[in-house]
Amino acid sequence: MTEEESTPEKPKVHMKMKVGSIEFEIDCREDQVQEIVEKVLSSVTAYASKPVPQLEPQASQPSSIRAETCRGIIEKLWAEEWFAESRSLNDVDKEMTRIGYHYDRTAIAHVLLDMVRDSILTREGKTKRYFYTQKRPPNPS
């Protein structure tokens, strides 16, 4: 038998530690705990002592405000007179996807119906085959 085979395996240790906002876990043998913890703490201390890079504020640009809600996006299309010609639900969905917005078609259909009720758009056609058209032009700014 070699010396390693005759020596019993040291017990394993699992530790969770939190220093400030940094959390870490350590798995090691019992005889390694002090060395590993000291290394981790010195690394955390070195990391915490580094200056945090400051972001420079960017000058606000006069570009239009990005519409985030489904209704806001469709109203923006309306304001741009995109609904000057009749559009189907599929057309609206494709246009919103093209400009980078992905909403469920039922949400889009709901907004279109609300805009019909608000007398912004008109709706013609049969159930599930409606076409939406601009009822009134946007107010000039």
Image (cartoon, rainbow, N blue to C red):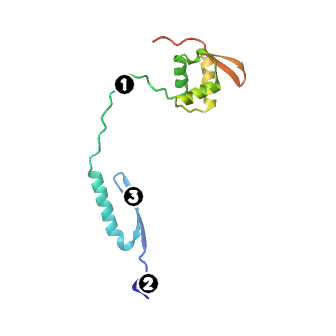
Q: Please tell me whether mark 2 sits on a helix, a strand or a loop.
A: helix
Callout 1, which amino acid? Gln
Q: Which of marks 2 and 3 is in front?
A: 2
The answer to which image quadrant residue 82 occupies is top right
Tag in front: 1 or 3: 1
Q: Name which residue type carries label 2.
A: Glu
The tag earlier along the polypeptide, 1 or 3, is: 3
- Is 141 located above or below residue 87 in the figure? above
Expressed as whole percent of the image width and height from the top left, the position of residue 17 reads: 38, 59
Cβ atoms under marks 1 and 3 closer than 8 Å: no
Disc 2 to disc 3, C-alpha distance: 32 Å
Q: In this view, does 2 lie to the left or right of 91?
A: left
Q: Nearer the viewer, residue 11 or 137?
A: 137
Residue that protrudes farthest toward the bottom in the picture:
1
What residue appears at the point 33 percent right and 52 percent down from the top-left corner?
20
| Residue name at image x 35 percent, y 26 percent | 60
Height in image: 5 above or below 108? below
User: From the image, which quarter does the N terminus lie in?
Assistant: bottom left
Which element carries disc 1, helix, strand or loop? loop
> Horizontal placement of 79 versus 8: left or right?
right
Which residue, given by chain and number where applicable, does mark 3 sit on?
24
Residue bearing mark 2: 5
Q: Residue at x 71, y 25 (%)?
A: 128
Which residue is label 1 attached to? 61
Estimate the x, y position of residue 12 in percent, counting from the top left. Answer: 43, 71
